[in-house]
Image (cartoon, rainbow, N blue to C red):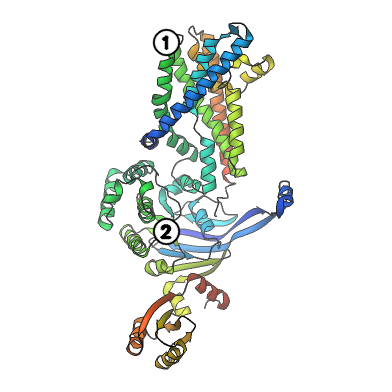
């Protein structure tokens, strides 16, 4: 395996005008030279190998998109070195563009008014994809998802899920070495999310494409990434494999159940039945923190079901935010 | 092979434009209303002047000129400033910048399909109607060839100016004011709203040294000149060619410098 992306100590700073309040302040701002420097990305280094799927995580405003824009060549780093497939992206933007594909979850690169197949044909000519490769790619797509009904539908008439799916297919069409997926599953329902995860996985396997995925959905990360990188406030917090992180914060999940009768009394009983879990109760729910290394949620549920009649249940994953908070507070290692 | 990646954008533009049938109808009606206003306005101007010929142009000359200028405007106006501004505000510009093609070219060729549709759906019909109604007041000869060459260069100059102004949006992050200002300046100084002959003398001479008159005045005067002198043709086309190259280099250079400024929204 060889490194496809090499980043060494990149930093990106933005100059932002200090805005004042009110009408008077706004008028003053017209003539203000009072800038402050915002450091969006602060001294980040990483190396990504060909064929990896890397989860790039962090809360909103952490600097994820800025890093991706530097890797794609839209932004120039303030300092540091960056090499994508041997190119310096902002110097050879056009050449770099040939090697990468991009999906931004909230906007589409497809031609709004045209049927999907026309967008594909356009991309074929723009990226100068040879006929044989193009046909091969379409055949591959056909084998992975049922694209036939989508091909002749104008993009503006598609549902969000169909559009995202189409955008992902469009990004892979010219068989790029790297695909950047920026929150691809945002706003999608569960079955569409699953479909898109399977698709990304299959494309990565078939074409050995490097995938850089930013997301707030731990489900995406669990399903796809072996390695994750976490940044916050522009600084790198974590860069290691998924297993390591799980081992670090434990694979905790919170099971919430609602039962008939007095919750407090039930909670006490449950605490006795499940000594390895911590149990608490509020007005509505009994929360049981399950450490999946010791007992799976299904086992716990099975135990509970024999003694209590469960009316309703919820399962809560530990969110990215919580993981980051935990790392932030406790540090890694 | 290289050309194919541009032509494919033209093709898409044509298909895209044809998806919106109603907009053509609305545009034709809008133009008719504008021309009616122009007709009565200039009728009043000629009536109050008291003579048949004002500044060397008869009422018919003026009207033919303005009708053709309107048709040419529909053909040439690319709304580039709008497009760039909107793309900057929505952040879509990031996706366009990531195409393996220069943004300047990408935008031009994306729009070029509309040239084709506009030419056949508005300019050509207008031209034919004017020719028929005026019983041959528009000469049909070698001037047509000069006109075509001139329009091609006019399109290029117009696009360069648009692109230059659009680039300013990178700094201001607002579109409206800039776009209106550009539109007023270009339309007034190019002779699209008032024939250049009507401008007072010092201003008119000054306008010949600006790029704007190469956009509307130059092609229209070549078209309406039934007996073109080689010298006039050469000067007009030469001047256009010069502006064409100059504006191209200027807008390209300015874009290159400005691109470093990009701080795309949501970044």
Q: Is residue B220 above or below residue B185?
A: above
Q: Which of the 4 image quadrants contains residue B135?
A: top left
Same chain for the residues at labels 1 and 2, yes or no?
no
Quadrant containing the N terminus of chain B in the rendered view: top left
Q: Position of residue A84 (x, y in %)?
A: 46, 54
- The answer to whether A152 appears left or right of A59 in the picture is left
Q: Which residue position is annotated with label 2?
A: A184
| SS at mark 2 in the image | loop
Q: Is residue B33 above or below residue A71?
A: above
Q: Position of residue B210 (x, y in %)?
A: 62, 23
Q: Which of the 4 image quadrants contains residue B259?
A: top right
| SS at mark 1 in the image | loop
Crowd class of label 1 (few under 14; some 14 to 19; many from 20; radius 10 Å)? some
Q: Position of residue B133 (x, y in %)?
A: 43, 12
Whether residue B153 is visible, yes or no, is no
Instruction: Determine which of the numbered discs, if any, sits on residue B140 in the image.
Output: 1
Residue at 71% of width from left, 46% of height from top?
Answer: A30
Instruction: Determine which of the numbered discs, if any, sits on residue B93 in the image.
Output: none
Whether residue A105 is visible, yes or no, is yes
Chain under disc 2: A
The CA distance from mark 1 to mark 2 is: 58 Å
Name the foreground residue: B12 vs A281: A281
Residue farthest along the front direction in this orientation: A261
Q: Position of residue A228 (x, y in %)?
A: 45, 68
Residue at 52% of width from left, 14% of height from top?
Answer: B63
Residue at 39% of width from left, 29% of height from top?
Answer: B117
Q: Is residue B207 above or below residue A99?
A: above
Chain under disc 1: B
Quadrant containing the C terminus of chain B in the rendered view: bottom right
Residue at 45% of width from left, 29% of height from top?
Answer: B27
- The answer to whether A43 appears left or right of A263 in the picture is right
- The answer to whether B5 appears left or right of B234 in the picture is left
């Amino acid at each position: 395996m060889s490194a496809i992306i090499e980043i060494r100590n990149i930093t990106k700073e933005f100059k932002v005008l200090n805005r004042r309040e009110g009408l008077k302040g706004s008028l003053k701002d017209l003539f203000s030279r009072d800038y402050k420097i915002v450091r969006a990305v602060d001294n980040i280094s990483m190396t990504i190998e060909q064929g990896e799927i890397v989860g790039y995580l962090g809360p909103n405003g952490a600097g994820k998109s800025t890093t991706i824009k530097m890797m794609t060549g839209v932004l120039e780093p303030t300092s540091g070195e960056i090499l994508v497939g041997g190119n310096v992206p902002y110097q050879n933007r056009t050449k770099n563009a040939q090697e990468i594909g991009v999906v931004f979850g909230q906007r589409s690169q497809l031609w709004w008014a045209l049927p999907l197949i026309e967008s594909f044909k356009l991309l074929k000519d723009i990226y100068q994809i040879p006929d044989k490769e193009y046909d091969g790619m379409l055949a591959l797509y056909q084998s992975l998802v049922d694209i036939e009904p989508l091909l002749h539908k104008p993009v503006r008439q598609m549902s969000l899920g169909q559009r995202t799916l189409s955008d992902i297919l469009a990004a892979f069409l010219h068989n790029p070495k790297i695909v950047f997926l920026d929150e691809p599953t945002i706003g999608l329902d569960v079955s569409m999310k699953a479909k898109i995860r399977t698709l990304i996985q299959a494309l990565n396997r078939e074409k050995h494409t490097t995938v850089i995925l930013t997301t707030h959905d731990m489900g995406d990360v669990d399903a796809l990434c072996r390695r994750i990188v976490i940044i916050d406030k522009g600084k790198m917090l974590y860069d290691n494999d998924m297993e390591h992180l799980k081992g670090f914060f434990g694979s905790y999940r919170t099971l919430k159940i609602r039962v008939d009768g007095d919750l407090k009394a039930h909670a006490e009983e449950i605490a006795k039945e499940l000594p390895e879990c911590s149990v608490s109760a509020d007005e509505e729910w009994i929360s049981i923190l399950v450490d999946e290394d010791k007992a799976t949620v299904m086992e716990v549920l099975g135990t509970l079901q024999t003694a209590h009649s469960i009316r309703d249940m919820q399962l809560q994953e530990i969110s990215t935010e919580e993981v980051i908070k935990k790392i932030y507070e406790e540090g890694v290692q | 092979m290289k050309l194919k990646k541009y032509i494919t954008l033209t093709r898409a533009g044509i298909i895209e434009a044809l998806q919106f049938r109603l907009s053509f109808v609305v545009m034709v009606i809008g133009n008719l209303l504008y021309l009616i206003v122009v007709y009565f306005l200039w009728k009043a101007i000629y009536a109050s002047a008291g003579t048949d010929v004002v500044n060397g142009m008869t009422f018919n000359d003026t009207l033919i000129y303005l009708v053709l200028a309107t048709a040419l405007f529909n053909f040439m106006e690319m709304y580039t400033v709008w497009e760039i501004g909107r793309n900057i505000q929505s952040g879509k510009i990031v996706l366009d910048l990531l195409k393996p093609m220069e943004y300047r070219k990408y935008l031009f060729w994306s729009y070029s399909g509309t040239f084709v549709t506009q030419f056949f759906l508005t300019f050509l019909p207008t031209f034919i109607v004017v020719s028929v109604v005026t019983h041959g007041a528009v000469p049909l000869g070698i001037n047509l060839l000069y006109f075509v060459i001139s329009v091609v260069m006019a399109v290029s100059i117009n696009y360069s100016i648009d692109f230059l102004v659009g680039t300013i949006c990178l700094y201001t992050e607002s579109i409206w004011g800039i776009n209106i200002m550009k539109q007023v300046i270009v339309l007034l100084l190019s002779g699209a709203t008032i024939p250049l002959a009507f401008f007072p003398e010092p201003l008119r001479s000054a306008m010949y040294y600006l790029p704007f008159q190469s956009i509307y005045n130059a092609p229209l005067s070549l078209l309406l000149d039934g007996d073109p002198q080689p010298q006039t043709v050469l000067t007009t086309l030469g001047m256009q060619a010069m502006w064409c190259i100059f504006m191209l280099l200027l807008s390209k250079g300015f874009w290159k410098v400005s691109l470093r400024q990009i701080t795309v929204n949501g970044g």
